[in-house]
Amino acid sequence: ADQKKYTIYLSNSVIGNDWLQQMLRSAEVSVKKGPLAGRVDLHIETVENTVQAQINSLNNIIAAKPDAIIVHAGSVSALDPTLERACAAGIVVVSFSQVVTAPCPWKVNTDWTSTNHDIPVWLAEVLGGKGKIIVDRGLPGSPISEASNKEIEAVLAKYPGIEVVGWYTSNYELGAEQAGVAALLAANPQIDGILTAGYGTGAIQALKDAGRPMVPIVMFAYNGSATACAQEPGLKCMIYTHPPYLSADAIKLAVDVLDGHPPANNLTENNYPRLTTDVVKGDFSKGAEFIKLEIGKNVFPDLPPGLVLPASPAWLDITPQEAAGTN
Amino acid sequence: MIPWLTNGLRSPSPILLAYLGALLIFVAVSLYSPGFAHPAHVSTLIVIAAFTGIVAIGQTMVIVGGGIDLSVPWLLNSAAVATTALTRSSDAALIWVVPMILVSSAGIGAINGLAIALLRVPPIVMTLSMNVMLMGLLFIVTRGFPPPPTPLALQWIANGRIATIGLPVMLFVWLALAAIALVVERRTAFGRYLYAVGSNRTVARLSGVPVAGTTIAAYAISGFTAGLAGVLLTGYAKQSYLGMGDPYLFTSIAAVAIGGASILGGSGSYLGTIAGALILTLLTGLLPIFRLDAGALKVIYGAVILFAVAIASPQLRRFFRRE
Amino acid sequence: MNLLEARDITKRFGGIVALDGMHFAAKAGEVHAILGENGAGKSTFIQILSGALVADRGKIMLRGKTVTAHGPGAARRAGIAPVFQELSLISDLTVGENIWFGDEALTPLRMISRRALNARTAALFAELGLDGIAPDRLVRSLSIGQQQLVEIAKGLACDPDILILDEATSALVPHEVDWLLDIARRRADAGKLVLYISHRMGEVRRVADRITVLRNGETVGTAETSAIGDDEIVAMMLGRRLNRLFPERHATATDRTALKASGLSVGHQLKGMDFTLREGEVLGVAGLQGHGQRELFMALAGAVRFGGSLEVWGRPVSIRSPRHALSQGIGVALLPEDRRHQGLLLAKPVRENVVLAALSRLTRFGLIDRQAEADVVSESVSRLQIKVGSPEQLAGTLSGGNQQKVVLAKLLATDARILLFFDPTRGVDVGTKAEIFAMMRDLAASGYAILFYSTDIAELVNVADRVMVLSYGRISATLPADQLSEDRILRATMIGQVAA
Amino acid sequence: MKRSLSSLLGRTDGWGMPLVVLFIIAGLIELMRPGSFGLEQLALICASAMILVFVATGETIVVMRGGIDLSVGGTLSLASVISATRADLPGLDLLPWLALILGVGFLIGVANALIISLLKLQPFLVTLATWSIVEGIALIVQPSEGGTVPPVWFAWGYSRPFGIPISVLLLMLLMLWWAWFRRTRMANSIRAAGSNERSAYLNRVSLMGTNIAAYGISGVMAALAGFFYATQTGAGSPVVGAQYVLPAIAAVVIGGTSLAGGRGGLTGTITGAFILNLTGTVVFLLKLTSYWQIVAQGAILVLVVITGSIVEARSERSGADR
Ligand SMILES: Nc1ncnc2c1ncn2[C@@H]1O[C@H](COP(=O)(O)OP(=O)(O)OP(=O)(O)O)[C@@H](O)[C@H]1O
Ligand SMILES: Nc1ncnc2c1ncn2[C@@H]1O[C@H](COP(=O)(O)OP(=O)(O)OP(=O)(O)O)[C@@H](O)[C@H]1O
Ligand SMILES: [Mg+2]
Ligand SMILES: [Mg+2]
């Protein structure tokens, strides 16, 4: 059919971690193959980590009058006035991952409410409703961490047998995770479970350094974490994700809107399947899906540890190699 | 005996007091939470402190020479990514990869030094820009892909314990580097030049001190130690990841400052920096124990740093002596 | 009645006793000189008087009343204005801002009007008979001599009852000294008190009504200047008699050329100089402030870029930097003008300062040879009689004259055999001056070549083999030994002025 | 001729060169994208630069005093979260609340000054510690980004008194303030104390007083930045301040103020802040691929500073001093 080519800018707030790199690569791959092949002229604008720089960058993007802007926002609220201006200028705006509070942009995100609900439920069920656990509070000041902390606290309140004996902040960073877990292990002779928001491998190493047996761990879906989990004897774990290909989803959404097929809702939230060594029964969120960890099938020891799983949305075929940039 | 030690004992130097501060924190926390002093945990703390300590070798030299190195995070990160990307998990490859990385890291540091010494770019601007440029270049070169896991030999160095005595391998790595740093600082002409340049460039220049050379060398050393820390850190994390250098920006500088060096140059010693690294590590290690929220933790963190430096204040001592 | 009286003043710095129960009294209407060798405690006393330091013990009485308030503000209110040996100017402010600091006239918006400030400064300079310093220049761009003049002007600006001049002439050239002595005299005649500290006996004799001598922080005695001879004063200061200030001069110059300059020029300050310095020679340089001697010395030391050509020990060289100048094949070392900003690492021990320029010589297998270092330091300390508590004392805590000696020691520790002495005796006491002159002649005799600038023309006349007089960046005369006299040199500095 | 150039640069407190560079950058942008500096565009540029300008203003004064203030990172955040979360308290009114918020900033500054002066500790360390403390308090007040700013304040942040966008107006006010402040006795005392503490003391400068003034101004400015941030974005963030600490110091340095103290001024700093702000636009217009943009940004900054220092060195070399 008569398919127009759209100019789309991806405004990215920061580049300093593996997740963001894969996000950018997924965006690039998504306009080269599959349904969007040849339909999008994609420009990636990256700034280094300040709200002010992203606002500047967005102002420049708006001045270039593109068809759409997809935004990975460095702040949930600071960009609002700027994005509203973009909308007012007739530009389709899609915010993904850390979604903004401004009403106008379309939004694509992981269903964090379900995820944050299921994380503690799994740990509590695996422990049989009884035990002492430690919890990672993520990155201080970040809205995602804050929401997660609140939800986890609320859920755990329903398991009187589970006691949170300590918190640490990993800043989603491996070294800090290892240091935090090590300190808590030192302070607590008994720890039965660990809930990290990051790599998990730091927690595993801390357990080993302290000479402790492995305990159930919830961690984020890095390939390295999943591999460690699958290969470590006796380790039970659950791995939740927040896929970097949200950027591809956002581009697709923008194109759909431009093509005249907007989604029914302003906000699209996806509840992704979680990988685990132990599928347990419990009061999980509606539609929650657990998949058994399997080396070679959903975990790839040969691929880099920093790859985030899963690599591709259903509507597209981003190979793990493409996502890892190793093709 | 060693004159600085005896002098130090007669009128306690800031350095001695910094160690005292570290000890105080350690004892206090151990009393509150006995597991803190468990050998396994102490070993972990030493390993963590060692990374800060190694980065801070170069930072100490640069600060003593009157500069500051803000390019540490992405220099470290680049070295780490290069280590895993180039070795492809092979121990044998370390033999050529590590020296190459260390030389390149020193080279990048030297570029900082060149621009600062010869083109008169203020250190803050130069190294901040270098940090950003390295970040960009790293992505251009690697296209941002996450590299394979770290070779096992490196994992052993960073995580290993020497079986017979139970001490971490990293402790010995750190001690060896610290010894070299102290000898360079106290016993070599370069060390003297560094203090001279940091104290007063004009005097240094007129006294025949190779001001530019000294500055360049200091930044090269900083590049080297940041690079080395990056290499070793991949062993600790078993992989490299983007952002792994970020925590070392302020900790390396704070370690130097807590260790008694003036941030304006001309004074300080790596001996003090070691105490600074220990204090900072103890702080991050102890805070989770108190079950406080992030906000309260930050308040305490700041307060303890303030306390640790305040006890070294001559003013405070004078005040108490008067009582 | 005494206008100012000090009793039993004691001041310690750690283990060092700077003042040890000293006492002092002075009357209105006199110029009262305070003398003493380097480190005797003069400046410490001055600083206590002017509120910069607090005495450990003792009391100060003004107009018969004990002073209770401390601090620079209190001293100022009591009518005391100090001109500090180490100056108290703010180098990042202009001349005018410095002179009227804290007393500026304010506009209705409480702003300082620069124009008014500059006009007021210009008026003050005119009244004092000072010229050549623009009120809106930044102090950091002035030479030491000019800074000293500004500091003096600042002291005079508030018309104090007690004006304290602590070695205020140490960087001034003869006509500026005359100017200051005249002012001091006039103030005394107008019923004010002037405390005058100097190591230049001639000046003291010309201006002071009475003198008080300090030694090791104690008062040795007070006398009418007219009633006491130079030798006696020196003996009171040093505790021994001094044979002679200037050494006997034997011509030691050989035919070998140490340094030959042709068409040497620096910016607009030095406009092409030709001269030759021979081995064994002490070549004097004279000239008024800002006539090119500073640039000459800095150029030869590699510290500023210059035009023209240079031969050192017969080889043409282009000196690129001070390091290059100090290097083996060349060996040119400079004693710079401004010891605090160019000569010393004030926050470092005397030991490190002394060996700083000689480290390459003291390094073995890459490490500094501590024994050799200690030897060099202890030798310098005793040779130059540097008064230090220990070699670890910080250079910045030494008395002014002793700081100068440390810079000198640093120079002598190098292997350089061409020495550029820019006013080497600035702030140095007579005893040590004699030492330094004798040493200069000894060095010359043993094959060194010395270029020697002094603001004190008598020194040039009595120590140098020849004297070049600079005027407006050119050599206006070169006077051989048999024609050397203060008069001739002074006249030669004027010739250029007339010509220009 | 050469002399007049160097004395001209001397008189500009070092902002002469940066300003030239800023005009070159702006010229390039206008060339690549005509109309980049219309009133609307200018308003946008100012709005996004103002937060940095405020923080860097305080930093300039502190650096002139010979210190450094890292705690502005915390103060900005704290001010923004107070603005965004305490809105439902009774007696809501723009001015009293603004006064309260600025007062908090001032107190933080005074605390810094007192600790530095009384204990004779390094400003770097003290403010690093207070940064952590104040950011901690901000996190307690509001654990994460969000909150709501009262509509009055939001309206204020986008108001146009006399037809001039508020950010442009604030910038003009700031420059007026500086034109006044730089000629006050306090400014001279701050410079003096930053140049050489001992000389300043001998000139009857109160070292603690100048510290209180400098850090106090810095605290107030950081709090103002936080308030402005909140009115611009409609929310507060307990950690956003951290983003501005190093850029503020960089703006000060690019503007020609020496970290050694005693020298410099706000004109240069504002210039520096705008240079930092506009390099992003230059890079955008160069149409580089994503990663090269980042490299280019760093490189441009270094180039800008090198150009400045070379020209300055040349004019300095004409004199033979030093
Ligand atoms: N801050 C200080 N710390 C330690 N010692 C000091 C300090 N200030 C002065 N001194 C010592 O006090 C003594 C007296 O010094 P002072 O400056 O008063 O001497 P002076 O008579 O002025 O000498 P000069 O003629 O060289 O200027 C010296 O031995 C000096 O080293
Ligand atoms: N980047 C630099 N390059 C060369 N020389 C420098 C540099 N920075 C400072 N200096 C020199 O270092 C010396 C000390 O600096 P400064 O003038 O600020 O000293 P100070 O201790 O503040 O005393 P003062 O009151 O005289 O200023 C000066 O001679 C200055 O020229
Ligand atoms: Mg003296
Ligand atoms: Mg200064």
Image (cartoon, rainbow, N blue to C red):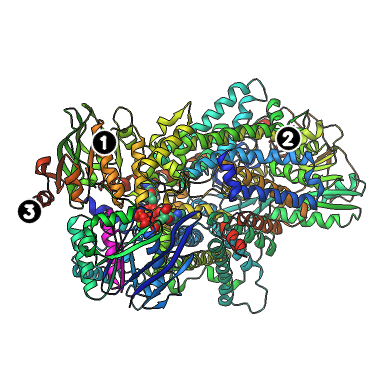
Q: Nearer the viewer, residue B39 or D252?
A: B39
Is A126 situated above or below D149? above
Q: Which mark is residue A303?
A: none
Q: Chain of mark 3?
A: C
Q: Callout 3 environment at 10 Å: few (<14), some (14 to 19), or many (20+)? A: few
Is C185 situated above or below C437? below
Disc 1 + disc 2, Cβ < 8 Å: no
Note whether residue A2 is visible. Answer: no
Reading the image, the residue beneath label 2 is A223
Q: Chain of mark 2?
A: A
Instruction: Say what amino acid the circle numbered 2 marks.
Output: Asn
Q: Quadrant of residue C97?
A: bottom left
The reply to whether the magenta stretch includes residue D261 is no
Instruction: Say what amino acid the circle numbered 1 marks.
Output: Asp
Q: Quadrant of residue B204?
A: top left
Mark 2 close to ligand 2, CB under 8 Å: no
The reply to whether the magenta stretch includes residue C162 is yes
Q: Residue at x 33, y 39 (%)?
A: C411
Is A54 situated above or below B82? below
Q: Callout 1 environment at 10 Å: few (<14), some (14 to 19), or many (20+)? A: some
Residue B276, image x, y percentages:
62, 46
The residue positioned farthest toward the left in the image shown: C499
Instruction: Say what amino acid the circle numbered 3 marks.
Output: Val
| Magenta span of residues | C142-169
Judge if badges 1 and 3 mark residues of a common chain. yes
Cα distance between the residues tagged 1 and 2: 80 Å
